[in-house]
Image (cartoon, helix red, strand yellow):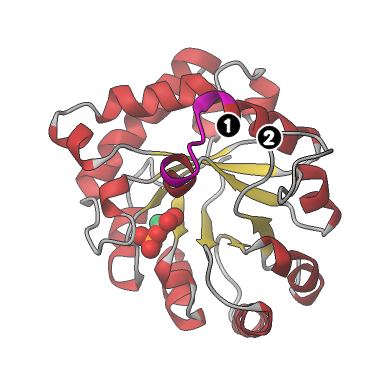
């Protein structure tokens, strides 16, 4: 059975003390009122080693927002999947549209990152999604298919089953514009159908596909109610414990 998941992406926000305070606050809130879904917080690298021992692993999984496409060595400033895993983190966001756009991460680079994440026991939260012009040209299915095929569809079925997908229309990220529940359901169903074509119905049915893009407490329930939307990847609203909890509560 696929899991319902609400994952936060802190991006480049919160210094270490602020991050620790947010993680503690969220942990307390969720300990007092248990979530009905898996909860993950993906933090800047420098927070990971401090945050993982602070939170109850039964309530909150911790992840990074990226990892290197190389194992180790002379890659100044990079952080490897092995290093991420050594902090106790269990997840890593890969292929976020900001990484693709600002740091020129190609499907080939992401393929390497996915392999290294899996080799180190991390669960990739792999992001796909089209930009506005592609949506307006009706090319969203083509775009997400190319992103999936370009980075993931060489994986074995066993490895693919370890991946969480996040469909994030780029035009909805941080813009306040949200895909409608119908738009989200339509493309999530398409994504699941391509997984079924590639890996079979069982793998497709067991893959969690999250929606991301201006998700907030007021729209989460309607989005997550769709049969192929298994939760959310949350940016801005993950930075306040009460807002993030409001989204988690969409599963109640
Ligand atoms: C994100 O960047 O993953 C995201 C969904 O951001 P926001 O919720 O702020 O749109």
Q: Is residue 154 above or below residue 172?
A: above
Q: Is mark 2 within 8 Å of ligand 1?
A: no
Assign the C terminus to one quadrant of the image: bottom left
Asked if residue 20 lies left or right of residue 36, the reply is right
* Residue plotted at (38% across, 40% down): 228
Query: In the image, which disc is placed on residue 69?
Result: 2
* Residue plotted at (49% across, 75% down): 239
* Residue plotted at (24% across, 56% down): 178
Observer-nearest residue: 167 or 2?
167
- Residue 111, given in percent of the width and then of the height, sits at 61, 26
Q: Is residue 225 above or below residue 18?
A: above
| Label 1: which secondary element | helix
Question: How far apart are the two marked residues, 1 and 2, measured between alpha carbons?
Answer: 7 Å
Observer-nearest residue: 226 or 146?
146
Q: Is residue 69 above or below residue 122?
A: above
Q: Which residues are magenta?
A: 101-108
Q: Residues within 10 Å of mark 1 (few under 14, many from 20)?
A: many
Observer-nearest residue: 44 or 93?
44
- Residue 22, given in percent of the width and then of the height, sits at 60, 81
Q: Is residue 207 above or below residue 177?
A: above
- Residue 25, given in percent of the width and then of the height, sits at 62, 85
Are dots 1 and 2 in contact, CB under 8 Å?
A: yes
Query: In the image, which disc is placed on residue 110?
Result: 1
Membership of 102 in magenta stretch: yes
Q: Quadrant of residue 136?
A: top left
Task: Decide which of tag 1 and tag 2 comes sooner along the chain.
Answer: 2
* Residue plotted at (74% across, 74% down): 55
């Amino acid at each position: 059975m696929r899991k319902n998941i609400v994952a936060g992406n802190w991006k480049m926000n919160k210094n270490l003390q602020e991050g620790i305070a947010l993680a503690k606050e969220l942990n307390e809130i969720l300990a007092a009122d248990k979530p009905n879904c898996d909860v993950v917080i993906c933090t800047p690298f420098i927070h990971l080693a401090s945050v993982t021992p602070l939170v109850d692993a039964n309530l909150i999984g911790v992840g990074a927002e990226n990892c290197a496409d190389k194992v180790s060595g002379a890659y100044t400033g990079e952080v490897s999947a092995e290093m991420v895993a050594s902090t106790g983190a269990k997840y890593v966001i890969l292929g976020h549209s900001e990484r693709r756009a600002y740091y020129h991460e190609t499907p080939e680079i992401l393929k390497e990152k996915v392999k290294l994440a899996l080799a180190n026991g991390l669960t990739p939260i792999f992001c796909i999604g089209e930009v506005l012009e592609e949506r307006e040209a009706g090319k969203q299915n083509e775009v997400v298919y190319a992103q999936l095929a370009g980075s993931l569809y060489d994986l074995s079925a066993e490895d693919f089953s370890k991946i969480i997908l996040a469909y994030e229309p780029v035009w909805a990220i941080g813009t306040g514009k949200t895909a409608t529940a119908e738009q989200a359901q339509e493309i999530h169903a398409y994504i699941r159908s391509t997984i079924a074509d590639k890996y079979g119905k069982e793998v497709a049915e067991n893959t969690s596909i999250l929606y991301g893009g201006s998700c907030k407490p007021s729209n989460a329930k309607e989005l997550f109610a769709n049969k192929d939307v298994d939760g959310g990847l949350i940016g801005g609203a993950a930075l306040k414990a009460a807002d993030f909890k409001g989204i988690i509560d969409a599963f109640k």
